[in-house]
Image: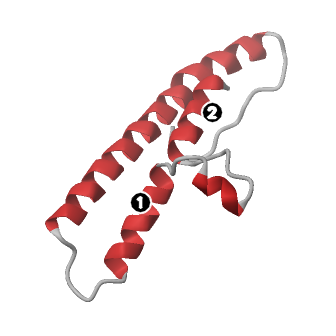
Amino acid sequence: MKKLTAIEEELNQTKIKSGQDALNFPIKLNNKLAALASSVDGADYAPTAQSYDVYNDLTGKIDAQLATLGRIKAEDIAAFNRAFAEKNLPVIVTRGKP
């Protein structure tokens, strides 16, 4: 759970519960990418080189988090499931790509 929570907290700001909380907690990768998309979409000109640089930086960081999630699914959850299956207990079923 700690590994999954760490990934979630890098991708999304989980501490925001009200509109004012956005002032107290930093935005995370998901919000940064959405803000970039809004900025590029709202312009009357082509995206700047800096926009592409920020996009590449953010997507690289997001891809790293998703790769870590894939490893957790393939290794940690698989090991957990093997241990539970040996005891005839329910296992965790994941959807999508590992």
Up-down relation of residue 54 to residue 74 (above or below): below
Spatial CA span between label 2 and label 1:
20 Å
Labels 2 & 1 near each other (Cβ < 8 A): no
Up-down relation of residue 38 to residue 65 (above or below): below
Q: Mark 2 points at which residue?
A: 5
Instruction: Give how far across and how far down residue 38 sits, in percent.
Output: 41, 74
Residue located 57% across and 31% down the image:
6
Q: Is mark 2 on a helix, strand or loop?
A: helix
Instruction: Give how far across and how far down residue 2 sits, in percent.
Output: 64, 24
- Specify few, some or many for label 1: CA neighbours under 10 Å numbering under 14, 14-19, or 20 or more: some
Q: Residue furthest left?
A: 49
Instruction: Give how far across and how far down residue 66 sits, in percent.
Output: 45, 41
Residue located 69% across and 21% down the image:
81
Q: Residue furthest bottom?
A: 44
Q: Quadrant of the N terminus?
A: top right
The kind of residue tagged 2 is Thr
Q: In this view, does 64 lie to the left or right of 53?
A: right
Q: What element carries label 1?
A: helix
The kind of residue tagged 1 is Leu
Give residue 33's mark. 1
Residue located 54% across and 27% down the image:
72
Residue located 21% across and 56% down the image:
53
Q: In this view, does 77 lie to the left or right of 98?
A: right
